[in-house]
């Protein structure tokens, strides 16, 4: 399979997996403290990542790779999960999913800064237009109702874009699953300790949906999704493949409506469709 096509396919699989992250987080944060949820999902994924690294006898990253791995950990292991969990205490998952429309722009921007990519000027025109649509929707529909939740989502998107771009750049040298695995392992001591310190006094009252949400974000959102995603970004290009994230709101809104019975308005779908159109145009100028 052609390298670029393989990258786009891997990226698409990653996006499908990530689409369930915010609805699953919403389920989990209904009964789990956001700090416990963030630490526990990272600790569970970290243990699995460590086992993978041992089973495949992966060599340790070089000293020069450690700062990049710490940036990945700060962005996608700690920052995005914690900030979204906090945000989802104030807003619905359907509303938060709209903010995913900003991720391609954030990822592309950090791809230029950290990955050395240089998309054409037309790319930025369409990328900024799509992001402006998302921001306008947030202001008109939700900013006055939940400014804290929207602010937390914006911060989460910025950190996530940085983590994506840094991880994709490093994946070219270490490999996709190795990058997220080492980032999780580096975070494991702190996350495991924080999980124990913030653990609920009893799990007897925790219902199945919350446990299912915790399981999903620990296994799929925190580890499996990144194996496909970082491989896709490394093979197909950060700016280009990063635009696939605009498909995530479609899948996420459907999950929010079917699993959580949340209200999904036509305006949300209209915003998502408009942004996807911008991304389709931007893709032509990604390289």
Image (cartoon, rainbow, N blue to C red):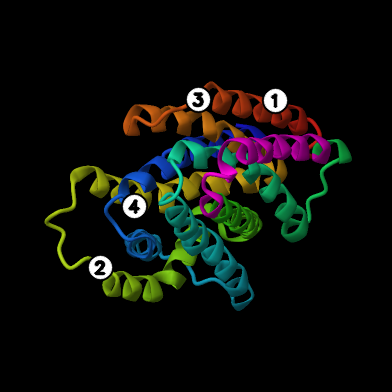
Where does the image place residue 157, in percent across and percent down from the top left? 59, 52
Q: Could you tell which of marks 2 and 3 lies nearer the N-terminus? A: 2
Quarter of the picture containing the N terminus is: top right
Is 192 rendered above or below residue 139? below
Whole-number angstrom distance, CA of label 2 to CA of label 1: 44 Å
Question: Front-most of 154 and 235?
Answer: 154
Whole-number angstrom distance, CA of label 2 to CA of label 4: 13 Å
Is 171 rendered above or below residue 235? below
Residue denoted by label 3: 265
**Is most of the magenta stretch helix, strand or loop?**
helix
Bounds of the magenta span?
Answer: 124-149
Q: Nearer the viewer, mark 2 or mark 3?
A: 3
- Could you tell me if the residues under marks 1 and 3 are in contact, i.e. CB atoms within 8 Å? no
Q: Could you tell which of marks 2 and 4 lies nearer the N-terminus? A: 4
SS at circle 3 = loop
Q: Give the quadrant of residue 175.
A: bottom right
The reply to whether residue 242 is visible in this rendering is no
SS at circle 4 = helix
Q: Residue at x 60, y 52 (%)?
A: 154
> Can you name the residue that lies furthest to the right here?
121
Where does the image place residue 243, in percent across and percent down from the top left? 66, 37
Residue denoted by label 2: 199
Where does the image place residue 88, in percent across and percent down from the top left? 43, 49
Residue denoted by label 1: 277
Is 169 rendered above or below residue 236? below
SS at circle 1 = helix
Q: Residue at x 81, y 41 (%)?
A: 124
Residue denoted by label 4: 29
């Amino acid at each position: 399979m052609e390298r670029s096509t393989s990258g786009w396919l891997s990226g698409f699989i990653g996006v499908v997996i990530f689409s369930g992250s915010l609805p699953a987080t919403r389920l989990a944060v209904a009964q789990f403290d956001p700090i416990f949820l963030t630490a526990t999902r990272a600790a569970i994924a970290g243990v699995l990542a460590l086992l993978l690294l041992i089973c495949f006898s992966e060599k340790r990253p070089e000293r020069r790779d450690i700062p990049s791995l710490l940036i990945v950990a700060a962005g996608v292991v700690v920052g995005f999960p914690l900030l979204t969990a906090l945000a989802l205490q104030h807003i619905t998952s359907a509303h938060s999913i709209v903010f995913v429309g900003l991720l391609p722009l954030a990822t592309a921007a950090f791809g230029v800064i950290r990955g050395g990519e240089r998309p054409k000027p037309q790319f930025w025109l369409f990328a900024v237009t799509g992001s402006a649509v998302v921001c306008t929707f947030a202001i008109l529909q939700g900013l006055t109702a939940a400014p804290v939740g929207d602010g937390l989502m914006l911060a989460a998107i910025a950190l996530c874009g940085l983590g994506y771009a840094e991880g994709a750049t490093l994946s070219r040298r270490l490999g996709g699953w190795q990058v997220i695995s080492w980032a999780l392992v580096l975070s494991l001591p702190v996350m495991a300790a924080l999980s124990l310190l913030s653990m609920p006094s009893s799990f007897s009252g925790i219902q199945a949906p919350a446990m299912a949400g915790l399981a999903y974000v620990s296994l799929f959102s925190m580890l499996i999704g990144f194996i496909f995603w970082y491989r896709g970004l490394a093979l197909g290009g950060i700016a280009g493949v990063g635009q696939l994230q605009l498909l995530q709101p479609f899948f996420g809104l459907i999950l929010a409506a079917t699993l959580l019975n949340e209200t999904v308005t036509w305006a949300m779908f209209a915003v998502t469709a408009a942004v996807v159109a911008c991304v389709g145009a931007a893709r032509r100028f990604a390289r």
